Image: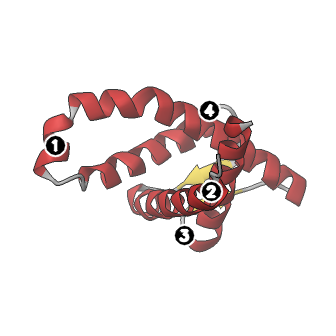
Amino acid sequence: MKVIIKVLVVAAALWAATQWVDGITVDAEDTAGEIGTLLVVALIFGVVNAVLKPIIKTVGCAFYILTLGLIALVVNALLLLLTSWIAERLTVPFHVEGFVPAFWGAILVGVITWLLGLILDRD
């Protein structure tokens, strides 16, 4: 059940990013298509984060220390760009136009996911 809630939270955060960040788009034809696209992208983003983020943190530990963790913003933006690239290969109509939209989108997705996690994570 927790996995389903996390996917829904990330999908909601991605929807907010498509609304507020120029350069992040979902090109679905209708609302149901948009919701489905956001759910698929949330799954892709979750898998990308689960697989790559621990590896990146381990390999780049010195960069995290030297930048006091600010490199995490760049890493999150690059992971969002990778998610967009994978979505395009799977013909999912989700696109991030470049690093700057990915940077702001990753910040927005991170903050919204954190806030919704605080609200919904009641064990």
Identified at 19% across, 36% down, the residue is 61
Q: How far separated are the C-alphas under marks 2 and 3? A: 10 Å
Judging by the rendered image, the residue that carries numbered circle 2 is 14
Q: Are circles 3 and 1 on residues that touch, CB within 8 Å?
A: no
In the displayed structure, does residue 69 sit left or right of residue 98?
Answer: left
Q: Nearer the viewer, mark 3 or mark 1?
A: 1
In terms of sequence position, does the residue under pointer 2 or pointer 3 come before the other? 2
Mark 1–mark 2 Cα distance, whole angstroms, equals 27 Å
36 over 117 or under it: above or below = above
Identify the amino acid type marked 3. Val
Please report the residue visible at 25 percent of the width from the left and 29 percent of the height from the top: 58
Real-space CA distance between mark 1 and mark 4, rounded to the nearest whole angstrom: 31 Å
Amino acid beneath label 1: Phe
Secondary element type, mark 2: helix
Q: Position of 96 compared to 79: left or right?
A: right
- Farthest bottom residue in view: 20
Please state the total of marks drawn on the protein image: 4
The numbered disc on residue 21 is 3
Identify which residue, 104 or 54, lies in the foreground.
54
Say whether disc 2 or disc 4 marks the residue closer to the N-terminus.
2
Q: Residues within 10 Å of mark 3 (few under 14, many from 20)?
A: some
Cα separation, mark 3 vs mark 1, equals 27 Å
